[in-house]
Image: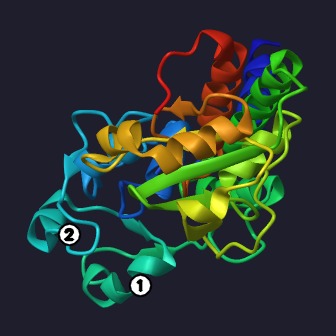
Amino acid sequence: MLCMATFFTSLHTQSLPTEKPSPRVMSIDWTQTETLLALGIQPIAVAQKSGYDSWVKAPAIPDTTEDVGLRSQPNLERLTELQPERIFISPMFRPLTPKLSKIAPVTEITLYKQGNITWDGLKTFTRTLAQDVNKPQAAEDLIHKSEQQLNNLANKTPQNTPPLLMIQFMDSRHVRVFGANSIYKIAANKLGLQSAWQNETNAWGFSLVGIDELIGLDSQIVIIKPLPIGVADNLQQDRYWQYLVNKTGRPALMLDPTWSFGAIPSTVRFAEQLSAALLTQPHSQENP
């Protein structure tokens, strides 16, 4: 009987599905980096870590992950020493493929293209990346957790909020205005809110316009940091900008950096910040 029990226990153990170990990976693109980290995968190397810390911020890159330099010009010698088993890139960095492929197999995953930035598009991207690092269940867990977070945020976000004019300053007179095909719009919609910008946007989800083109929109202005050097001071003294904000009838909101061209992690992070800012809006003191 003991032998039979041992046999069936062994047979049951052998039948259980097991995930293959994750490869040693390096990611050039910050969107892939944030998603890998959210999936529980620590890349052995990334590019331009300081830029990630400024523009993306979270999930944080561990100190033990090597920074191999610029995204457009990674240190190939150092990368070779680290012996990655797979390197992830986006189409923007395709010219690097011939050199990178001499170090390790290169996988290109496309996310940002016209009409692809929807919640379903973000889920597909997450599942594709997870499959490539042998973590399919981690993708399902991340998607489920994120959808729960967004639902919870929607339940407490003020639903009488005007359409959102979500902008990022390039200089004191020009902004990126985010609308269709942007994660900011996805986040807003998941909270039950709408975008004020109905004009055409590019594949990255924004229109580049002068601030004079923002006049007359009944909206809640939402500014996403970081601000270029000197812009905050200039806006404090810019009468046209002050007139534009006053015309909306409500102060502008200022949010901490969230990667404009991110995936699920950045979408949820932006939704969290947006919901929190709207809830505390009457007491906000940080408005340019």
Give the side of residue 156 with respect to residue 179, left or right: right
Residue 151 position by quadrant: top right
Circle 1: residue type: Arg
Give the side of residue 277 with respect to residue 60, left or right: right
Nearer to the camera, 248 or 226: 248
Residue matched to label 2 = 74
> How many numbered marks are there?
2
Residue at 53%, 55% (x, y): give it.
Answer: 133
Residue 106: % across, % down: 41, 76
Nearer to the camera, 233 or 278: 233
Residue 200: % across, % down: 75, 75
| Badge 1 element | helix
Residue at 71%, 31% (x, y): give it.
Answer: 13
Residue 148: % across, % down: 81, 26
How would you rate the neighbour count of disc 1 (Cα within 10 Å): few for under 14, some for 14-19, many for 20 or more? some
Give the side of residue 209 with respect to residue 75, left or right: right
Question: With respect to residue 23, does 80 lie above or below?
Answer: below
Give the side of residue 99 with respect to residue 32, left or right: left
Question: With respect to residue 7, does 201 lie above or below?
Answer: below
Residue matched to label 1 = 94
Nearer to the camera, 105 or 54: 54
